[in-house]
Image (tube, helix red, strand yellow):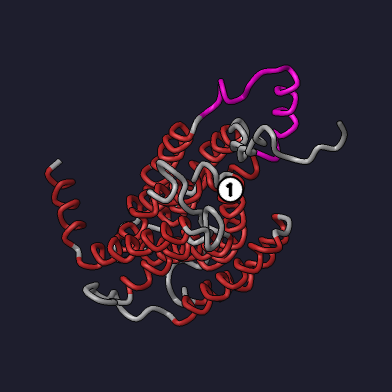
Amino acid sequence: MWGTMDSLADLLDDRSFQAAVAYSGIGFVVITVVASVRVWGRRPPLGGFVLVAATLAALGGLGPAKSVGNLPPELFIGLGVLAATGIALEWFRPPLVVTMAALLPGAWIVGLALDGVGPDWSRPLLVTFTAIGGALVADTDRYQERRGFGPALLAITIVGVYGTVPDTEHARVLLGAALPLLFLGIPTPVAKLGVGGSATSVALIMWIATVDGVGRPAAIVGSAGAFAILLAEPLGRRAFSRLRQKVRRKNHTLARHLVVVTDVTLLHAVLALYASRVAGFSDTTAAAVWLLVPMLAVAFVAAGTFPPPPRPRKARPRRGHGIVLDR
């Protein structure tokens, strides 16, 4: 217990952690203002960009933060390519597979930032997971934006990453930047991650998980598993769509029996905890992968039971107004 308290005290006293919280908090205020004046819609797709920008600023030693060393230029270039690609995809909204393919070039550049770092399979994992996972996270974020799942669940994922990597030099900065992100989705959705924000966030999280997880490679696998519901929601939603339609035909209201926002958040937290503290602490990477299989199966089935997000209410026409077609 005392060790946990000392670790928490060290975290709170870390200058880079404090700076990351401050930078992300400033971004939260900016996003709130942008959302209130509807500059980029009711829920602007800026949450992921704020997370990445705050983390990079603190890691680079901006202001009171303590620099962790020179960051690879490939990391910035790759994140920039992913951001630009995501902004374009935000307007066109192509199919999921097309989004994955479009994110591959930026993911490949970010993978170059792992030159000589991590096991041999860490770079292919980073590239493929950024492309596939980034597209899945963006799809979850877009479909569930009225519930704020994207920012809230991603913040919980980052807590799981921090709890599994043996070296937390980079992860603690990421954690500090993620704390204000939680309030973008809870209690009222203020913003979404966006396609570019989702892709850049996934890439940066997995890069940090790889760099800080070198001492225990299973932690890299556990960090990937901590995305849980964010990865499973689009797959479960598509796989169980017919079943959900049959339930509706029988006049059963899904919302009466299925999870609400708090339940989904709690489920994601439990799955992220399992991935980080059980799979992430395995002796071998193979064991970590096998431990993630039942967890992903649970996430997939659970995601298929989520009720559809609420639809925007249509304003009722006032009496005496409107067009009269015939009297």
- Which residue is painted at 35% across and 56% down in the image? 165
Q: In which image quadrant can residue 162 be found? A: bottom left
| Label 1 environment density (alpha carbons within 10 Å; few <14, some 14–19, many ≥20) | many
Q: Compared with residue 235, is residue 11 higher up or lower down, i.e. above or below? A: below
Magenta span: chief secondary structure = helix
- Residue 270 in sight in this render: yes
> Residue 236 location in percent, x, y?
64, 38
Q: Which residues are magenta?
A: 237-259
How many marks overall?
1
Query: Residue shown at 61%/46% (left/top)?
Result: 143
- Residue 24, percent from left and from top: 35, 62
Question: Can residue 213 be seen in this snapshot?
Answer: no
318 left or right, relative to 45: right
Q: Which residue corresponds to mark 1?
A: 140
Residue at 32 percent across and 76 percent down: it is 60
Check if residue 239 falls in the magenta segment.
Answer: yes
Tell me if residue 205 is in the magenta stretch.
Answer: no
Q: Tell me which amino acid carries mark 1.
A: Thr
Nearer to the camera, 104 or 293: 104
Considering every residue shown, the one lying at the far right of the view is 326
Residue 229 screen position, x and y as percent: 52, 42
Q: Nearer the viewer, residue 182 or 37?
A: 37
Question: Which quadrant holds the N terminus?
Answer: top left
Mark 1 falls on what kind of element?
helix
- Give residue 277's position: percent from left, percent from top: 36, 44
Q: Is residue 28 left or right of residue 300?
A: left
Quadrant location, the C terminus: top right
